[in-house]
Image: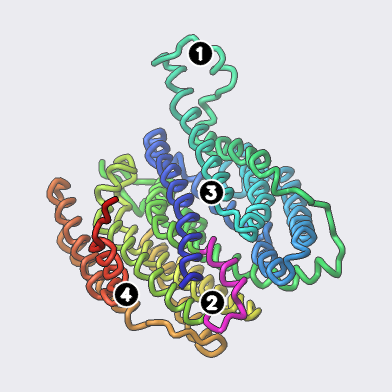
Amino acid sequence: MSTFKKLASDTALYGVSTILGRLLSYLLVPLQTYAFTQPKELASNVEFYSYIGLLLVIYTFGLETAFFRFSARKPEILTKTFSETLSLVLVITLTATVILLFLAPEISVWLNYPGQTAFIRWSALIVAIDAIIAIPFARLRVENKARQFVKVKMLNVTIVVAFNVFFLVICPDILREKYLSGLKPFINYIYNPAIGPGYIFLANLLGNAFYFLLLRDEFRGFRFRFNWPDVRVLYLYAYPIMLTGLANVVNNLTDRLFLRHYLPEGFYTGANGMVLTNEDALGIYGSCFKLSVFMALATQSFRFAADPFFFSRAEDKNSPELLALVTKWFMIVCVLIWVGVSLNVDVIGVVMLSSAYRQGLGIVPLLLLGNLFLGVYQNIGLWFKLTDKTKFGTFFTLVGATITIVGNILLIPVMGYMGCVVAFLASSFVMLALCYGFGEKYYPVPYDVRSAAGYVLGAGLLIGGCWQFPISNLWIAVPVHMVLFGLFIIGVLFIERDTFQPLLTRIRSRSAKPIQSN
């Protein structure tokens, strides 16, 4: 039980940083959608950040996982492994970044975003920094420095949010002389309103630059090392993971990369009856998609703690049983998130999005379910990492990516951005099913499949029923949905009462102890 407590403790710590960080980042969603009331203004932001996610996987090349693996096997040469891993990332990243900076004008024309060359260059620098600091962050996790990890992440998010507020709110207000009008000459010098949504990229870039200061101690002992025999070992282990990650990112980002190009012109109309452009549709979809990231909070928090945790216990004969128990509760938490967000997505939309973006809220429950399947897949997919059979991960995600790509091409023209959601949902489920099936053969784990299926089915029926009978008045809808959510939680607690019974007994025994007088 102590090992489970250790994993739970680390997950909670990483989770606090992830959740608080994402909550601060979520403040940017209303900030940005209210600052740029035309959804098309954020189209390039949605698309460029999709490319950033794609490039980050290529730059890091699966070397985070390779670093976990080899540092766990030989912790006495951790510094050497760190230097070799980071050196390989530097070679890949710096080469690609120089090319992107040089070709930025041509890329802006090719992507049909003329005049946004600077945005592309800023994006190239953002992903370069993200790739380089990925290995120092991995070192923090290997060395069990969760608190330092949390501290750095939180400081970075705070800095990025602060720069967003400065560029999107304070600078425009000062130019309009709402306050601090004496600073107007200085603001005129450093701020150009024509850049508009480009300041979102610049704020991110400036925030990322602080990483080098915040992580300076984690670069200790680094020496550029490119000894091919050693690097080759890292490469051979990492490249299947990179392909897996690449296929996984394609699976997650294809929708935002394809939507603008495959959506028929005039497919959507706004609330005012005006025909929306494809850029408007992409801006709406991208902004609503961010609301589905609530599920990613649980997934990412768990993954940060689970990878080094299970690698360090790969030879433990009790690992399969522990993984089954962890997966069960991971699924329960994810289902609760799915229900809680889906039942209250209407009020969340009012708070988080300006009115022009809210017509896409119907995609959020299905996106949450797709992310739930993907999170469980990543969880049970630990088997092919622990057994060094990473080729299976590549196969699963290539199948998923194929379903996503073909699904988007076929469904976007007839279903719009709902086609993106259906393709993502189908892909995530197929990947999960394949991973479970093969895992039972090569690394059997006693998963409680019946319990997991029951929770998903019950939650789906509740969510579907609420969406079939919507309540337009939020003053009535919110209390009703909260009561339903509370009843669902009570149902889960009742089903899992055998798990909680020992804990309740312990609490009662402690409270029943007589107070001793002095």
Which callout, 1 or 2, points at the residue further toward the start of the chain?
1
> Which quadrant would residue 41 be assigned to in this image?
top left
- The nearer-to-camera label among 4 and 1 is 4
Which residue is painted at 37% across and 35% down in the image? 34
Which callout, 4 or 1, points at the residue further toward the start of the chain?
1
Mark 1 to mark 3 CA distance (whole Å): 37 Å
Q: How many labels does the image show?
A: 4
Which label was assigned to residue 150? Answer: 3
Find disc 4 in the rendering and name its residue: 499
Circle 2: residue type: Val
Circle 1: residue type: Lys
Badge 2: few (under 14), some or many (20 or more) residues near its Cα, within 10 Å?
some
Q: In this view, does 301 lie to the left or right of 462?
A: right
**Secondary element at tag 2:** helix
For residue 261: magenta?
no
**Residue furthest top as drawn:** 182
Residue bounds of the magenta highlight: 303-318
Mark 4 to mark 3 CA distance (whole Å): 30 Å
**Secondary element at tag 3:** helix
- The nearer-to-camera label among 4 and 3 is 4
128 shown above or below 413: above
Which callout, 4 or 2, points at the residue further toward the start of the chain?
2
**Secondary element at tag 4:** helix
Which label was assigned to residue 184? Answer: 1
Badge 1: few (under 14), some or many (20 or more) residues near its Cα, within 10 Å?
some
